[in-house]
Image (cartoon, rainbow, N blue to C red):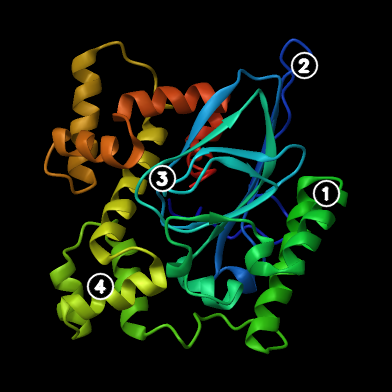
Amino acid sequence: MSAGSGSASAGKPEKNFPATAINGTAINEHARRRPARPLRPYIAWYTGYRQRGIAPAVHRGLPSPFLTLIITLDEPLSMLAHADPAQPPGDFVTLLGGLHSVPALITHDGAQSGIQVALRPLGSRALLGLPAGELADIDVTADSVLGSAGTGLRERILAAPDWESRFAVLDEVLLGLVAGLRGLAAPAAQVSPEVAPEVAWAWARLLRAGGDVRVSELADQTGWSARHLNSRFRTEIGLTPKAAARVVRFSRARRLLAQAANEPPSHDLKSHDLKLADLAVECGYFDQAHLAREFRSLAGLPPSRWLAEEFRNVQDPRWLSEATWVDQAG
């Protein structure tokens, strides 16, 4: 999922849907904004969420072009299944996960709250002190990578009174992390020098093309062999160029699908099929069947079922239309 367009200021939430009471008990609260400007080469956005009194559910953490940092607020994050099946289920107070190409499963009993930070893979060295490839397909606690800064970050967020204040804490702590790791008074607006320019170019090309680009083209343009590009790219991103292209294309497709879901409903099945067929062409799939196969592979279910699950889990279609909630555990 791509970052929201626009230039929201560092101190003002880009989107903020206030808590909604249903029968006096349920709460559905979300807020989103971009980080402080010096952090934007490394971080796409912050998303805050708090839900209470909703139906227990299982949420799919889908593949996306971002690493995910989650700091919980009122209850831990319950991982029912990780992208790596060898990693056992468990609860996380904080979670840091790399790119993956299969869904993770998160469960809740009717309440969940926290902040998700969408980390750009090429910012991983500057922000975390390691390449994104070291976190591919796994989930770890934030303090296992960030040390005491991870623990202190959550404590300060818990003490903050509102979303704007919590996001300000994130800005301050993460700016300090980048400056400390790079030995700078302030972070520079570029990826770490350890990242080869060829890898940075190939990743940017994939994002611009929405994943619809051949690996052979990337290799030709970098002047590297496909094998060398695969190795270097996987180290810095966490996926091979081919796998990353699938994830980027899939992420774009589900964003467009979520946006289309807010259009006036149609009970005409032919109309529904036509929209999926158009979506497949728009995103570079061979046909609608190809789109459906990719959804089953990357999401674990077909497009229509994924959309129905997300509307049920989110409770508020306005938030789904912003295409932010879909990456909550991605």
C-alpha separation, residue under disc 3 versus residue under disc 2: 36 Å
22 up-or-down from 61: above or below: above
User: Which of the two marks, 4 or 1, is nearer to us in this view?
Assistant: 4
User: Which of the two marks, 3 or 4, is nearer to us in this view?
Assistant: 3
C-alpha separation, residue under disc 4 versus residue under disc 2: 51 Å
Q: Mark 3 points at which residue?
A: 85
Question: What's under tag 3, amino acid-wise?
Answer: Pro
182 up-or-down from 316: above or below: below
Q: Are marks 3 and 1 in contact (CB under 8 Å)?
A: no
Residue 158: numbered disc: 1
Q: Position of residue 187 (x, y in %)?
A: 64, 81
Query: Reading the chain from its start, which is encountered first: label 4 or label 1?
Result: 1
Q: Name the residue under label 2.
A: 25
Query: Reading the chain from its start, which is encountered first: label 3 or label 2?
Result: 2
- Name the residue at 23% across, 80% down: 228
C-alpha separation, residue under disc 2 versus residue under disc 1: 22 Å
Q: In this view, does 134 lie to the left or right of 265?
A: right
Mark 3, other Cα within 10 Å: few <14 / some 14–19 / many ≥20: few
Q: Do the residues labelled 4 and 1 touch (CB within 8 Å)?
A: no
Mark 4, other Cα within 10 Å: few <14 / some 14–19 / many ≥20: some
Question: What's under tag 1, amino acid-wise?
Answer: Leu
User: Which of the two marks, 2 or 1, is nearer to us in this view?
Assistant: 1
Q: Position of residue 278 (x, y in %)?
A: 20, 35
Q: Name the residue under label 4.
A: 230
